[in-house]
Image (cartoon, coloured by chain):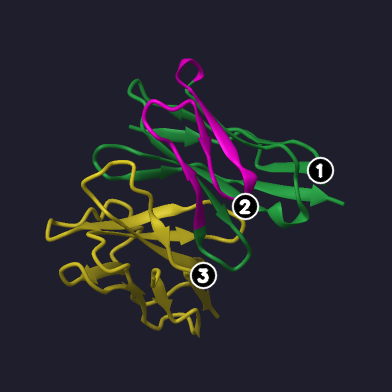
Amino acid sequence: AQSVTQLGSHVSVSEGALVLLRCNYSSSVPPYLFWYVQYPNQGLQLLLKYTTGATLVKGINGFEAEFKKSETSFHLTKPSAHMSDAAEYFCAARNTGNQFYFGTGTSLTVIP
Amino acid sequence: GAGVSQSPSNKVTEKGKDVELRCDPISGHTALYWYRQRLGQGLEFLIYFQGNSAPDKSGLPSDRFSAERTGESVSTLTIQRTQQEDSAVYLCASSLLGTVNQPQHFGDGTRLSIL
């Protein structure tokens, strides 16, 4: 079965610093991968999605994710954190059976 | 365009009562999912509807939980004889099928509190 692991349930960065949120998937066949963001009292909003053949995927709000098949990873980055980036981030994988598998989430705190 | 709509946004009820939560998916989305999110935790899969196929109910935690969907429209999640551990945010998502890199689109959830 597919699974998604997010390392670090809480990440704190200073405003203007690099954001790195880690996600690893477990599958011999790379699934379709997504990053979502959840602001307080809201549902999940799509940040970006993996496109077959791409290694670097660009999303909204300046976020990017790099797909590395050799490391089974899909880490999320942003060069410079803003206060408004403080939220919960979820990595998700979709298999060909249309089932989605979510990581346990990473809470990002941005320190002014 | 309209997104996924869930109602009510908040529901407070007494232990032992039944509750019904509603989800209006994005028009044309054949797949619909229900998740439970307890405070400070990730998403717990409950049930998945795909068109007119039999739903995947493998995530329902007990027989007190049930869900229905008519065709590709509204879905209702029913919790009977509610218990305090049912307190959570219940999220609904819909998705297109046919192309596997289609994401899920989420509603804002129903926050359920059992007294």
State the image quarter where residue B22 is shown: bottom left
Instruction: Give the colour chain A carries in the figure.
Output: green
Residue type, numbered disc 3 = Ser
Residue type, numbered disc 1 = Gly
SS class of the residue under badge 2?
strand
Q: Is residue A2 above or below residue A108?
A: above
Position of residue A24 measured from the top left corner of the image (x, y, whole percent):
51, 29
Residue A86 seen from this side: no
Residue type, numbered disc 2 = Glu
Was residue A54 drawn as part of the magenta stretch in this picture?
A: yes
Q: Which mark is residue A82?
A: none
Was residue B84 drawn as part of the magenta stretch in this picture?
A: no
Q: Where does the magenta region start and end?
A: A45-71
- The residue mark sitting in front, 2 or 3, is 2
Q: Considering depth in this image, is A40 or A84 the residue closer to the camera? A: A84
Q: Which mark is residue A16?
A: 1
Q: Is residue A40 left or right of residue A29?
A: right
